[in-house]
Amino acid sequence: MQLDFLFNPKSIAVVGASNDPLKIGYDIFRNLTTYQGRVYPVNLKEREVMGKKAYRSVQEIEDEIDLVVIAVPRQHVFDVVKESAEKGAKGAIVITAGFGETGEEQWIAAEKKIVEEARKRGMRIVGPNCVGVMNTVRGLNATFIMPARAGKIAFISQSGALGAGIIYKTVKEKIGFSKFVSLGNMADLDFSEFLEYLSGDSDTESIMLYLEGVKDGRKLLSSLEKVTQKKPVIVIKGGRSSAASEAVSSHTGSIAGSWEVYGAALKQAGAIIAETIDEALSMSRAFSQPLPKGRRVGIITNAGGGGVLVSDQLEKHGLEVPRLSKGSIAELKKFLPPFASFRNPVDMIASARGEDYRKATEIFMRDDGIDMIIEISVVPTFAGIERDEHARGIVEALKSSKGGKPILALFMAGDVSARAREVLEAEAIPVYERPEDVAIAAKALYEYSKAKRRVNNEL
Amino acid sequence: MQLDFLFNPKSIAVVGASNDPLKIGYDIFRNLTTYQGRVYPVNLKEREVMGKKAYRSVQEIEDEIDLVVIAVPRQHVFDVVKESAEKGAKGAIVITAGFGETGEEQWIAAEKKIVEEARKRGMRIVGPNCVGVMNTVRGLNATFIMPARAGKIAFISQSGALGAGIIYKTVKEKIGFSKFVSLGNMADLDFSEFLEYLSGDSDTESIMLYLEGVKDGRKLLSSLEKVTQKKPVIVIKGGRSSAASEAVSSHTGSIAGSWEVYGAALKQAGAIIAETIDEALSMSRAFSQPLPKGRRVGIITNAGGGGVLVSDQLEKHGLEVPRLSKGSIAELKKFLPPFASFRNPVDMIASARGEDYRKATEIFMRDDGIDMIIEISVVPTFAGIERDEHARGIVEALKSSKGGKPILALFMAGDVSARAREVLEAEAIPVYERPEDVAIAAKALYEYSKAKRRVNNEL
């Protein structure tokens, strides 16, 4: 599926662009003023919008138009879509709400008519009732919300407001996305088309979905089966409970279906299921690392309690925290103090320096009994230990070894860990703040590696 | 148990206080320089520490001493404890590590001897191998880490480094504590003494424990039974898995015990069990609200997906999201737009204003079918909606109603929600950022209210 007209449009018309900050067309147009492509405001009443000449219609624009963003009252959407298709636009994002999701026959029919009109001339529709589309790599923000931070996760959300909330949240938490799509009512384009496009997108390492329900389950599953062979797809399924599944049908007009059916089918198709937004983000971020060969996790820590909580979580998820080999223990004893613990987790105690992290990581990299490494640090604020030296030690070990094993980091010290996080993330080592997050990330890496191996063996 | 000598000492001696930033006694003394009580540095070699006259020993100080903080090499700890007890100090915090937790007989014995010596003269010991003690209300930070933010949760941690990590994390996340204690090896004072003290502490609304294992389980359970009748106690139990329980015995010298035994007994004694640090914090924060009369939750939202995810989580925890009464629906229809959803969750859609939150909350306050209210907002950044108006609407409703029902808020917009959060928290309404956190908070309120009702009925 070719969707470049959405993510890399050469030219965009914003219908409903406005100088009035109380209108959504104000936010959309303002967000697009910094885009590298050509952007045209369309407004019946205003002569210019934010200093740019405004057009009375899409037709009037003396340029080819790839993409039209539509934020006009619902009774005008059909006309704008028709006109855009006639103009030769390849895609339209319909922000306007009040169609299928109302449950009213008149507006369900209107939504259908819009899609039929567009398809006559090969134009595709995102929405209606959506937040829009972002491509952080190109600086494209065709939405009315703040831009996402750039990163390697593509995020497709069936809920607009929740999608917005996740964008805001990840800006605060410094988690980035390659692309963002708010699907809205999915009258035309839905999960499948985006999944297939993103599976070939070189800026995307993993794909995260917020899914409530779809009309055509088979189509989704068949796309998932194909796409998950190339990239991990992490799914948050909203609407599992009875109250929630009623809410789903009202706010998206889709059928939530029973979780028993959905959950099993999604997993069967290769998707990784997340219980919460944070689980999904934690898992999606893990795929900047290589896949592990097995389920055995080696843990290095300077905080006993951190090691304990991570071990608990890993075991809950079916991963192993095996004893270390005698050889590794002997090597650790050469430089760690006698109060350290030489089991797994290796507790290097609070006095541990960057050098200790480096050496311990190198030993774990060589130990054949370990498939994945989790590095835990409560960055100390005392005794002259530098705030990023643990992180630097880990990065040195990564560079000096042949690598090959995934490293995940748990740095549990709030803002005290900020510098350490930057050092690690510059080397694509994902950094987590909570034991359960790093554990679920390890689980996702293991699950996906297992699924991949199975597929490869079958081939 | 009277522990004012720890939390409100009139005078403190810091043995090992130092001008050398590489020593832990530097951080401890620096943290205490702003304390309102009298603080004396003790150091054999230095004449002054941070501009204050240094004493060669505790005995030399020409003042009564309530509390001694000890950060000297382990071979000197016994002498300092003896001298402090002879001086008449009521308590000592032994920061120094290398005792029972090493598993070495010599140092296990040394730890015992220290406690025996202290007890001869009625002096009590915190630690050894601990981070120290804080009382945020008095500005007391007798630790080597940064001060916690002030709040209403008391936090007792068996793991020092993890405790420190949680302090750093909560500073970043703007969650506050009334008191903090790092128990270390619990050679003398342990969970029980602190629980009993905190149950009578007017600055503390709830008590949070990070527990790995204790030597005397009966003593802990008997304290819990008493204390939980007065205040909720939330327990994170580390060391449930086999790898972790081995790690526990090494880093605290305690026995983790099997989770089956611990979990059931803790619950039986009235403790609320948290699976993770964030669950424990979320639950502890909920108790600024009144207790609910039942399990029926009413949800108000401007984001459909948020309502869906919260409903899923609530149902998972055994709470109910009931249909609304016809009366309430009729009242909601008077002011909400036709696209809104009048089920529960009430989805007021993205255009909802502060007034809508106020009116909907007032209706929920009056509806006899609702025991608790969850307010969800993805604070909009568009169309001229003010960033704190939803919060202000909720506060107005709280003030105009008789109250009585707990309100919990889920504001899912990262820093965009910052102002709203301040407005709500000024009225003691706890604000969460994740669906699972607000749901577990509701569960904790319900569980504790149920336990309280049962106890009252039995009396």
Image (cartoon, coloured by chain):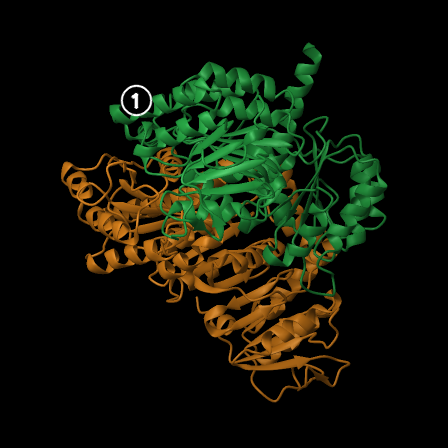
Chain colours: A orange, B green
Residue furthest to the bottom in view is: A62
**Viewer-proximal residue among B440 and A193:** B440
User: Residue at 56% across / 70% down in the picture?
Assistant: A141
The answer to whether any part of residue A236 appears in the image is: no
**Viewer-proximal residue among A280 and B430:** B430
User: Residue at 60% across / 58% down in the picture?
Assistant: B415
Quadrant of residue B372 within the rendered picture: top right
Q: Where does residue A393 sit, x and y in percent of width and height?
A: 28, 56
* Residue B251 left/right relative to A22: left
User: Residue at 54% across / 26% down in the picture?
Assistant: B194
* Residue A67 left/right relative to A393: right
**Three-letter amino acid code at the position of disc 1:** Ala
In this rendering, is residue B320 above or below A454? Answer: above
Residue furthest to the left in view is: A327
* Residue B316 left/right relative to A99: left
Q: Where does residue B15 sit, x and y in percent of width and height?
A: 42, 39
The chain to which mark 1 is attached is B
- Rendered-image quadrant of the N terminus of chain A: bottom left
Quadrant of residue A425 within the rendered picture: bottom left
User: Residue at 47% across / 20% down in the picture?
Assistant: B121
Q: Where does residue A55 sit, x and y in percent of width and height?
A: 69, 84
SS for tag 1? helix
Q: Where does residue A2 sit, x and y in percent of width and height?
A: 44, 69
Q: Which residue is mark 1?
A: B109
The answer to whether any part of residue B427 appears in the image is: yes
* Residue A130 left/right relative to B354: left
**Viewer-proximal residue among A119 and A35:** A35
